[in-house]
Amino acid sequence: MTRIAYINADPGVPAGGTNGASIHVQEVLRAMLARGAKLDLFVTRLDGALPADLAAVQVHSLPAVPPGDLAARELAALRTNETLRPLLEATYGARGCDLVYERCSLWSYAGMEFARDHGIPGVLEVNAPLTREQATYRGLVHRAAAEAAAERMFGAAQVLIAVSAEVRAFLEQTPAARGKVAVVTNGVNPLRFPPHLEPIRPKATDEFVVGFVGSLKPWHGVEVLVEAFAQLRVEVPVAKLLIVGDGRERASLEAQLRTRGVAAAAEFTGAVPAESIPAWLAVMDVAVATYPALSDFYFSPLKVFEYMAAGLPVVASGIGQLNDLIEPGINGLLVQPGSVAELVAALVRLHGDPSLRARLGRAARERVLYHHTWTAAVDQVFRLAGLSTPAQTLPAATR
């Protein structure tokens, strides 16, 4: 049996949470369990319990990072290394483990150094240029220390997993990472998206529901969707807007809808449990990912993979990885980032052509279920680490 140490020292990514990053953690754990692994999870923040189907995961708690002064929080996160290394030594001792897998976080280098020092494959999953992201969006006091910690973890890792080509390009700028970076995109769990998903609630037969799933943050471009929806209602009066998720932009988006006189046609669910997302997607006729024209778009958008797995026609910004994932007119539609006019035109087109919606949705589902599953991603990780895996098969229920 393969024994894996999974490390998530990021206090902003609760392992039992409901946001996209938390779902990423849970799905990788599930895929590893499905491959017969024995899992130890070393985690700074859990937020309740893991989902019931992850009960076999042995949880080891790292010190919580206290709220308060940013500089003090950073130093507390850095000190987590002083706890993590002895905990790994105590957990595995002379037996060791077969793989140390870590979701990259600011400050955490002890896991990769433990793996290197014990001759264990160390795989570091990198989802973003974290130092730059932290400094831009949340503030970073001890930047030099954060960059030094990144050098240590990159240098110690045997393999770095980038979720997109853009993250790989960022990593390759660092000498410590150069030459050992591979791209492994996000994916889906086919068992969560069986054929003929039942909607979480009934909808009127004449409704045309345009949906979005995700946190309401500025870089998700939901304000573009709201403006486009207001214009769409002029041409398609039966259109409804469904926003599944929550965040600091919600109040502003609701005010924008009220100003445009279409608030009554929009629904905000707030944060919802991850297990209900497929049923919410089943309410939608079209799903949208309206990213703005970001100069450093490095995401591997989990929402888009899940839209596609649900068999939905997707309208997304033509940016970054989305240009590779979506073939316009084949398995979705692409629009210029930030273009309200193009988004409106795409939605009007899809409303007027149900057969196109069905064709795009079928092709989208086929693409992700055969090429972008979490099991396939974990198998790729195992191969990069030099571990053997059984052959992958697609569950019959998803075909």
Image (tube, helix red, strand yellow):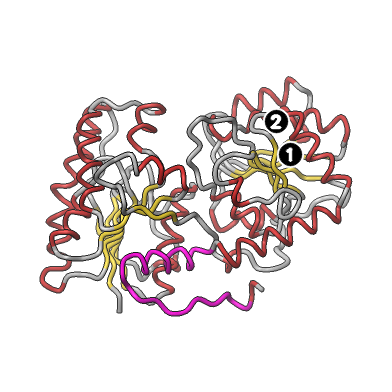
Label 1 sits on a secondary structure element that is: strand
Q: Measured from the top left, where is residue 392 in percent x and y?
A: 50, 76
Label 2 sits on a secondary structure element that is: helix
Which quadrant of the view contains residue 12?
top left
Whichever of callouts 2 and 1 sits on the residue coming sooner in the sequence is 2
Residue 95 shown left or right of residue 49 in the figure: left
For the N terminus, the quadrant is bottom left
**Disc 2 packing (10 Å; few <14; some 14–19; many ≥20):** many
- Amino acid type of the residue tagged 2 in the rendering: Val
Which residue does the numbered mark 2 point to in the structure image?
A: 226
Distance in Å between CA atoms under marks 2 and 1: 8 Å
Q: Which residue lies most toward the front here?
A: 179
Of 263 and 290, the residue lying toward us: 290
Q: Which residues are magenta?
A: 373-396
Q: Is residue 171 above or below residue 385?
A: above
Q: Measured from the top left, where is residue 240 in percent x and y?
A: 78, 40
Q: Which residue lies most toward the top here?
A: 259
The answer to whether marks 2 and 1 mark residues whose Cβ atoms lie closer than 8 Å is yes
Q: Is residue 359 magenta?
A: no
- Amino acid type of the residue tagged 1 in the rendering: Leu
Q: Of the numbered discs in the image, which one, if any, rests on residue 241?
A: 1
User: Which residue is found at the position 59% from the left and 26% from the top?
Assistant: 251
Q: Of the numbered discs in the image, which one, if any, rests on residue 53?
A: none
Residue 74 shown left or right of residue 311 in the figure: left
Q: Is residue 387 magenta?
A: yes
Residue 305 shown left or right of residue 330 in the figure: left
User: Which residue is found at the position 30% from the left and 75% from the top?
Assistant: 2
Q: Is residue 112 above or below residue 129?
A: below
User: Which residue is found at the position 89% from the left and 45% from the top?
Assistant: 352
Q: Is residue 103 above or below residue 106?
A: below
